[in-house]
Image (cartoon, rainbow, N blue to C red):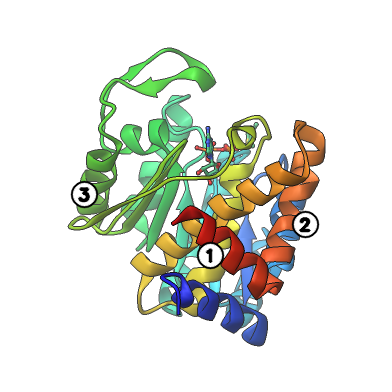
């Protein structure tokens, strides 16, 4: 038994149960999100049309809301999909892409948090800091929170929104508002390929679908797993284009090859 036996169990259950993950997500990364979901054995579906939301939610095991390319007239779709998820008690994951970059995104992320019971919030440090009204340094995509205590940012956001919070970056931080876990690893190439955060959202949702009674461990497991995926992808490629494809291949490889998982995690200890 190694320390990560519990993550292998989650991966095994994903393969057995094939949970359907309903994504309302951005069209920059939608295809990669679908493929990474399939690579670990879950099933993706992307549906925005309001009339089909009840059917889709009835089959789904988790719902992911990602505001990356959201338009004003689509906000209501997210609210309706979120209400269905809440009604069915499904894990509901929010990726507040770009919160802090525009007033529209900040307002929309906060609106979703106010009107829905969000189970897990996953975002980079700037996005999560924005949700707890911390000031920023820099502009646009290079902005970072002026407060670099990311563990505390995760904890405060989790307390404020009564949700599990996963802050991503060179190191990830996961908190339930009480405990905070710090996760190292991954690859610097992950910041050179768009959508690694969005793909992690799909993995978080897949883990949450299986581990719905323990969303802290689901989020922690997803973070550890995806850091390992990044590391294996880097061993297989050194440039962003091939790295992107190798993320999907590596997710598939390590989700299906227990020996590979053992080897990576042995190395890490
Ligand atoms: N420099 C790095 N070193 C190691 N891992 C990284 C690095 N940068 C990002 N990651 C990993 O990449 C994933 C995405 O994190 P990131 O903070 O870049 O998300 P994001 O800004 O929301 O990305 P996007 O908006 O492109 O989807 C996480 O799993 C994170 O741990
Ligand atoms: C680049 C970009 N713009 C909106 S969504 C997205 C993908 C990364 O979040």
Query: Percent x, y for residue 69?
Result: 63, 38
Could you say which is closer to the camera, residue 63 or residue 189? Answer: 189
Q: Earlier in the sequence, mark 3 or mark 2?
A: 3
Indicate the secondary structure of the residue bearing disc 1: helix
Q: Mark 3 to mark 2: distance in Å? A: 37 Å
Task: Determine the image quadrant of residue 213.
Answer: bottom left
Q: Residue at x 64, y 33 (%)?
A: 189
Q: Nearer the viewer, residue 46 or 9?
A: 9
Crowding around mark 2 (Cα neighbors within 10 Å: few <14, some 14 to 19, many 20+) is: many
According to the picture, the residue beneath numbered tag 3 turns out to be 160
Residue under numbered circle 2 = 249
Mark 1 or mark 3, which is nearer the start of the sequence? 3
User: In the drawing, what numbered circle is on residue 232?
Assistant: none
N-terminal of the pair, mark 2 or mark 1, is 1
Label 3, secondary structure: give it: helix
Label 1 Cα crowd, 10 Å radius (few <14 / some 14-19 / many 20+): many
The residue to which callout 1 is attached is 205
């Amino acid at each position: 038994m190694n320390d990560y036996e519990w993550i292998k169990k989650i991966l095994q259950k994903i393969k057995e149960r094939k949970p359907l993950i309903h994504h309302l997500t951005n069209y920059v990364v939608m295809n990669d999100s679908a493929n990474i979901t399939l690579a670990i054995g879950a099933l993706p579906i992307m549906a925005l049309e309001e009339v089909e939301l009840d059917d889709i939610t009835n089959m789904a095991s988790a719902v992911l809301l990602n505001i990356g390319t959201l338009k004003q007239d689509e906000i209501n779709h997210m609210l309706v999909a979120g209400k269905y998820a809440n009604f069915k008690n499904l894990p509901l994951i929010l990726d507040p892409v770009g919160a802090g970059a525009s007033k529209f995104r900040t307002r929309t992320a906060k609106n979703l948090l106010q009107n829905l019971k969000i189970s897990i919030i996953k975002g980079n440090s700037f996005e999560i800091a924005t949700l707890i009204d911390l000031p920023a340094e820099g502009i646009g995509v290079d902005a970072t929170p002026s407060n670099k205590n990311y563990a505390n940012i995760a904890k405060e956001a989790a307390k404020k929104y009564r949700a599990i919070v996963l802050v991503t970056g060179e190191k990830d931080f996961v908190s339930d508002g009480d405990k905070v876990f710090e996760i190292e690893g991954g690859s610097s190439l992950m910041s050179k390929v768009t959508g690694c955060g969005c793909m992690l959202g799909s993995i978080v949702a897949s883990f949450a679908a299986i581990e719905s009674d323990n969303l802290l461990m689901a989020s922690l497991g997803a973070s550890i797993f995806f850091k390992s995926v990044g590391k294996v992808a880097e061993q297989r490629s050194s440039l962003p284009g091939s790295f992107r494809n190798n993320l999907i291949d590596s997710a598939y490889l390590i989700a299906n090859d227990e020996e590979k998982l053992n080897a990576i995690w042995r190395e890490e200890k």
